[in-house]
Amino acid sequence: MSRAFNFSAGPAGLPEAVLQQAQEELLEWQGERASVMEISHRGKAFIACAEQAEHDLRKLLDVPPDYAVLFLQGGATQHFAQIPMNLAAPGQAADYLLTGSWSLKALSEAGPYVDAQSIASSEGDGFVDIPDAQAWSVRADAAYLHYTPNETIHGVAYDYVPEAGAVPLVADYSSSILSAPLDVRRFGLIYAGAQKNIGPSGLLLMIIRRDLLERTGQARARIFQYAAHAKEGSMLNTPPTFAWYLAGLVFKWLKQQGGLSAIARINAEKAELLYRTIDESAGFYRNPVAKRARSVMNVPFTLHDPELDVAFLEQSKAAGLLALKGHKLVGGMRASLYNAMPLAGVKALTEFMTEFARRHG
Ligand SMILES: *Cc1c(COP(=O)(O)O)cnc(C)c1O
């Protein structure tokens, strides 16, 4: 058996070189005579590893010094609730842009804490586009504006960064962080679950402008306070040490690839090849998303005849192309093309798709 091309939406494939290094040093790490999983997070060796990961992330994303980087737990879903607790007074206005399932969930989880309102939504059209930048405005008293730059399930991505004036912009970057350069200064808070483009599940990365840590927010235990985590260097309690270590290896791998501009070029090439294959299939395959809003990371597509879905999934799996089944909300197929997916994987997929269409068209 050998490793296949893995198109899973998350937890997703990791760079093979990273897994190999982790395997080599799994039992004994850096002269510790123990695994990185088996040592104290407060010891010198792990602290150095944790600091190096933060340092490399800051370099990759060019994070300014007035932003804190936090390594947290709970997944993006927990922070759908925790962000309003930290950034808003009870019942304060908080605005949301809705472009798919994840932004809907973020809005719904904020409900108990804030006056959370959708100020623009593409739900009426089945989440196949993004709202025009001119089509919405933020309430002046909003604690923040929340949006989802890349909707993992619907395969919808923004081609602009929303402008909210003095209202801080909060972005759920779970499925597109580190896929291309971004200007951190445009944001108040960026958060991302690790399991798509960073590392294993169990880790949540947050980049937060330090002045937002001073907001009073709502009554909550210290463990829910971002300011407390920032003060303790994300070691208020035991952090997910293995995931943090592995994320550090991924950051090093990204630097070796030439950084985010280089990885963005490869990602664009991968997505372009797959969308071209879909668009030139004479209707055999179809992606419903408006061209300007097509995601580079997650590409949902349907077959012209859903009766062929089972055969497509069986044969693609046999051809070494894993996890192409679409999310149940959208149906059909979905190929996730995160950083760790090499161009060769997308070539193998598109060749398979063309051949499958030829045989069943
Ligand atoms: C996967 C995903 C989530 C959910 O992450 P959990 O870690 O399962 O809570 C939230 N938002 C986006 C955009 C995602 O892709």
Image (tube, rainbow, N blue to C red):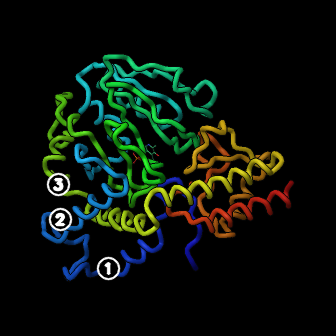
Q: Is residue 194 left or right of residue 225?
A: right
Q: Residue at x 29, y 66 (%)?
A: 245
Q: Residues within 10 Å of mark 2 (few under 14, many from 20)?
A: some
Of the residues under marks 3 and 1, which one precedes in the sequence? 1
Q: Identify the element where label 1 is drawn.
A: loop
Is residue 163 shown above or below 78? above
Q: Residue at x 32, y 30 (%)?
A: 168
View quadrant of ligand 1? top left
Q: Disc 1 designates what residue?
A: 25
Location of residue 179 in the rendering, given as x and y in whole percent from the top left corner: 48, 53
Q: Position of residue 312 (x, y in %)?
A: 73, 58
Mark 3 and mark 1: Cα distance apart in space:
24 Å
Q: Residue at x 13, y 69 (%)?
A: 44
- Name the residue beneath numbered marker 3: 235
- Compared to residue 230, the image places residue 197 above or below, namely below
Q: Secondary structure at mark 2?
A: helix
Q: Quadrant of the C terminus?
A: bottom right
Q: Position of residue 128 (x, y in %)?
A: 62, 34
**Amino acid type, residue under disc 1 in the picture:** Glu
Three-letter residue code for mark 2: Ile
**Residue 123 at what x, y percent from top left?**
57, 27
Q: Quadrant of residue 77?
A: top left
What residue is at 22 percent from the left and 62 percent from the top? 51
Q: CA distance from mark 1 to mark 2?
A: 17 Å
Of pointers 3 and 2, the one earlier in the residue sequence:
2
Q: What residue is pinned by disc 2?
A: 47
Q: How many marks?
A: 3
Q: Quadrant of the N terminus?
A: bottom right
Q: Pointers 1 and 2 in contact (CB under 8 A)?
A: no
Towards the viewer: 173 or 308 = 173
